Amino acid sequence: MSSPHPLTPSPVQEVRERERGDDLQQTPLDARLASVPEEVFRPRPMARALFGLCLAALLFAVLLGVSVGAVSIPVTTVAHLLLARLSPFPATLNYPEMFSTILFDIRLPRVALMGLTGAALSAAGATYQGLFRNPLADPYLVGVASGAGLGATIIISMGLPVTGLGLMAVPVGAFLGGVLTVGLVVMMAQVGRTTPVTTLLLAGVAVGSFATAITTFWMLRSPDGMRRAFSWLLGGYAGGGWQPVWIVLPYLAVGLIVLQLNTRALNVLQLDEEQARQLGLNVNRLKLILVGAATLMTAAAVSFGGLIGFVGLVVPHALRMLGGPDYRRLIPLSALGGAAFLILADLIARTMFAPQELPVGVITALTGAPFFILLLRRLKRSVF
Amino acid sequence: MFRKLFFPALLALSVLLGACAAPAALPTATVEPALEPITLTDSLGREVTLAAPAQRIISLAPSNTEIVFALGVGDKLVGRDDFSDYPAEALKVQSIGSLYPKVNPEVILALKPDLVLAAGITNPDDVTALAKLGLTVYTTHNATGLADIYSDILAVGRLTGHSADAEKLVADMQARIEAVTARTAALTDKPKVFYEIDATDPAKPYTAGPGSFIDQLLTLAGATNVGNVSTEQYFQISLEELVAQDPAIILLGSFTYGGQTPELVKARVGWDKIAAVENDAVYIFDDNLVSRPGPRVVVGLETLAKLIQPELFK
């Protein structure tokens, strides 16, 4: 694995360089590596400021997200209502009850869910890109999306009652569909006792296409459920409320912790598998842990948020370009950045043609792609 | 003496108080006295309770909008979905957008409805979301037959305090349908009819299969539905099958949303040998008359009958 141009160091080389001080001293390195300038070792100057920037962006996105909507509520009113709800002393505010319903039962849970979804997709995307050492990897790479789509469609076509337990049937179906599909992919991809990246990718593509084909077939067979399935695929779970937030939150929290605990290993993996193994890394175990954590996060997010493209690709890449490829920073940065990005994208989706809502995936693609291209052109250095 | 005066006085007082409490709503039509709350079970199996007849209604489907107007309560409609375009007055009502990918709950809440009429085509998750916000949502049927439409009309009648009007409307519909079927029931010559729903792919257009609502209406109108070859209610029929069946009449419901015309059908490759095309028996048809489970299905049936059995219905 070598970079296409000696002056555009890849993260592989950077990590090699960084590790050269200790264990790798004896490992023979490319002669070219010796000429890599010193500055590559240091974290990019932007890196430290990036955390602050991402936090500020997230805060800004949340405030904007709860202030703007189809119904206009003055920003001061929003602030009053929020402060009154947060403060321990209940104040009596003279605003229409509708404002508080819109704020606390519609916008806030929606902003929260979008934030969690964006964080999950983006962190999972960064993980897959590192794990597969492939810049095109996205959170749906190993079949979560197509599996979730199939699960949701099957449940919808069953026409379960929409009262009581049946309420959550669609997200549960999507979650199970996603997780089972990835499980199947990982099982199929195993060669002996290892899970080579290539077979994992191929199995993901094959099983994914298969699941998508069944989904299409199933939708055509049950025209009554088609609208609902279509609605879910485009926009996710429409049931609203705080419940989805409380369900997704633990998956995201645990997933992020697991990913963060493995970021050093992920850095080492950027060498290549053989070298990482020689360094004492159990590469196969690492793969299963990372795929498992990323899949659970993505599946939980997708079951409620629907299939939202581009977040898991654009956000990690943008942050990688700005802050460097160190996964110890990249994973938490991606979570923050992804949350802010998706909250803003959803804001545009629900206000641009209000009262008509657009699928948020349309906005992520429309805004994400040009932004991505701009970044690529301005920072013409390969970070992969 | 006091007793005799007390009750009328109390009654008058309560009427006055009631009038003061609700000065905004000025019912123009005569509303039946509704002393008890109205409780109904909707098509999703949810129990829906209204304390009093609805005064501010939002309709989430064209069929519901048409029912509301047919019952004479169109003036109480404060919101409608984007597709509700009939009657013309409906277009003056504020739109709440289309329902895909999901309903915008803020707009609905802002209109302060006391009744939201969802339909069989509404995503049940949207119904859940609106109900969670404390709104009263009643879901009409994904109608599989005329009986469902009658029951929807009667339900909307009860929810709006216009039960008598609803019963009258249903009786009228039944009488008009009876008038058609009385003449078609004994027919032995039932021409083969192909009803085209969508011709995005003219080589295999969508049509209605056995038991579908369109199939039921075609049969009542004295036709043999070509789509009966399938077991599916909605499916894509192959051109080969169509040529083999050789329908005598083609109805282009695909005109309404797809702009298909008899001229376009004539120009389609391989269609010129079908009897209906050869004999110029290809007609455009307002698909809304048979695809919206509302009061206008009667007009749909009568129009079908005139096209299919012109001799019987001059």
Image (cartoon, coloured by chain):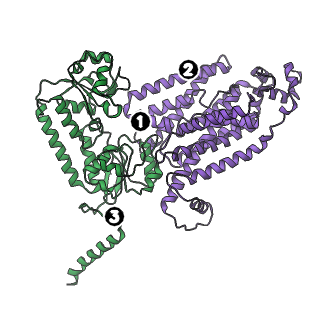
Chain colours: A purple, B green
Residue A147 x %, y %: 53, 29
Identity of the amino acid at label 1?
Arg
> Is residue A195 visible in the rendered structure shown here?
no
Residue A279 x %, y %: 81, 25
The C terminus of chain B lies in quadrant: top left
Is A218 positioned to the left or the right of A266 in the image? left
Chain to which mark 3 belongs: B
The residue tagged 2 is A206
For the residues bearing labels 3 and 2, Cβ distance under 8 angstroms:
no
Residue A205 x %, y %: 57, 22
The residue sitting at the bottom extreme is B1
Q: Nearer the viewer, residue A128 or B84?
A: B84
> Is residue A218 visible in the rendered structure shown here?
yes
Q: Secondary structure at mark 3?
A: loop
Relative to residue A4, is residue A40 depicted above or below? below
- Residue for point 38% across, 53% down: B136
Q: Marks 3 and 2, Cα distance to the nearest angstrom?
A: 61 Å
Q: Nearer the viewer, mark 3 or mark 2?
A: 3
For the residues bearing labels 1 and 2, Cβ distance under 8 angstroms:
no
- Residue for point 46% across, 50% down: B105
- Residue for point 67% across, 47% down: A57
The residue tagged 3 is B25
Chain to which mark 1 belongs: A
Q: Nearer the viewer, mark 1 or mark 2?
A: 1
Q: Marks 1 and 2, Cα distance to the nearest angstrom?
A: 27 Å
Residue A111 x %, y %: 57, 48
Q: Secondary structure at mark 1?
A: helix
Is A217 positioned to the left or the right of A144 in the image? left
Q: Secondary structure at mark 2?
A: helix
Q: Marks 1 and 3, Cα distance to the nearest angstrom?
A: 36 Å
The residue tagged 1 is A227
